[in-house]
Amino acid sequence: VIDLFLHNPIPPTDELVAHLEGIKGTLRAEAEAAETERRRGESDSTSSSSSPPSFSVVVRVAHLVVPSSSPEHWSATADALERLGEKEKDENEDENDENDDDNSCSTLLWVPPNFFEGGGRLLGSVIEGKDRIQALKPRARLLEKGDAQEVFGRDVSVTSVVGGGLGLFTEVVFHLRSARAVLTADSAFCLSQEDAAASVAGPLDLFLARVVGIYGKLGSPVGVALKSAPGGQGREFAKDVLRWCENDNVEMVVSCHLSAPVRDDAAGQLRRVFGFLL
């Protein structure tokens, strides 16, 4: 079984669904080829004349992660769970039964700390997204720092911060060790000069990108919220991220916004962006 986690759900268009199925197919084929070769080697070493037992590789979406309380990161989550999540089928259930229970999805949904008490609830009310938030609540689990390795395995670390007035801003950031990658949502992103030149960004867009410090480099438009996080959370958040940057453990930053991945001195840029919190 190969478990996938989807980070930052976006509207599940037909194109996205087809892309995900393509990824699943590639992973399945590679895993089956590797396992077939391994079993063939074991068969040769034991001089067995019998064929190796048949097998199949299951690739499933085990986790879906909402990384931030900002509405663009969760507004499509319910739809994404419906189309991209894995369905649990009762052995006695008719395959043609279209009246699936909403709770039959086996994909686990993860949200940042304080998501329902702060940012998600309040921002959801402002943008008339209250019903969407309530639909997620029975399915969601809060992703805490100490949960990462138990949930996702030893290769993954997370840190989180709840900042801003009334805890409006909350975000969870990932470190994928084997990929040497940091996944961010709103805490750090960039608009590269190449992407700006190739896009429909107008003069005002470029002006704002320069003002908030994201043009041509990583920046943190939510720096004030991070700095105002109570109980020293901003400092601990920064310490976690910068600790990941030690010993060449970060080679790229993949943000949910604008230009990604950022590879040019990724660790150095993270140190610059979050250093003011220490």
Image (cartoon, rainbow, N blue to C red):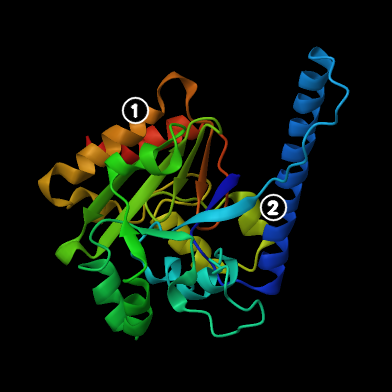
Q: Name which residue lies at 21% across and 56% down.
A: 163
For this orientation, the residue located farthest to the right is 49
Residue 196 in the figure: left or right of residue 45: left
Q: For marks 1 and 2, give the one nearer the viewer.
A: 2
Image spot of residue 127 (x, y percent): 35, 82
For this orientation, the residue located farthest to the left is 231
Residue 37 in the figure: left or right of residue 102: right
Image spot of residue 26 (x, y percent): 75, 47
**Which residue position holds label 1?**
243
Q: Is residue 185 visible?
A: yes
Residue 119 in the figure: left or right of residue 252: left
Residue toward you, 253 or 125: 125
Q: Is residue 277 visible?
A: no
Query: Would you call the spot at circle 1 few (<14 residues within 10 Å), some (14-19), or many (20 or more)?
Result: few
Inter-mark Cα distance, 1 to 2: 33 Å
Q: Amino acid at mark 1?
A: Arg
> In the picture, which quadrant includes the N terminus?
top right
N-term mark: 1 or 2: 2
Residue toward you, 176 or 273: 176
> In the picture, which quadrant includes the C terminus?
top left
Q: Amino acid at mark 2?
A: Lys
Q: Which secondary structure lies at badge 2?
A: helix
Residue 173's place in the image compared with 201, above or below, is above
Q: Name which residue lies at 64% across and 55% down.
A: 195
Q: Which secondary structure lies at badge 1?
A: helix
Image spot of residue 209 (x, y percent): 46, 58
Residue 207 in the figure: left or right of residue 60: left
Image spot of residue 106 (x, y percent): 48, 62
Query: Would you call the spot at circle 2 few (<14 residues within 10 Å), some (14-19), or many (20 or more)?
Result: some
Q: Which mark is residue 24?
A: 2
Q: Quadrant of residue 40?
A: top right
Q: Name which residue lies at 53% across and 66% down.
A: 88
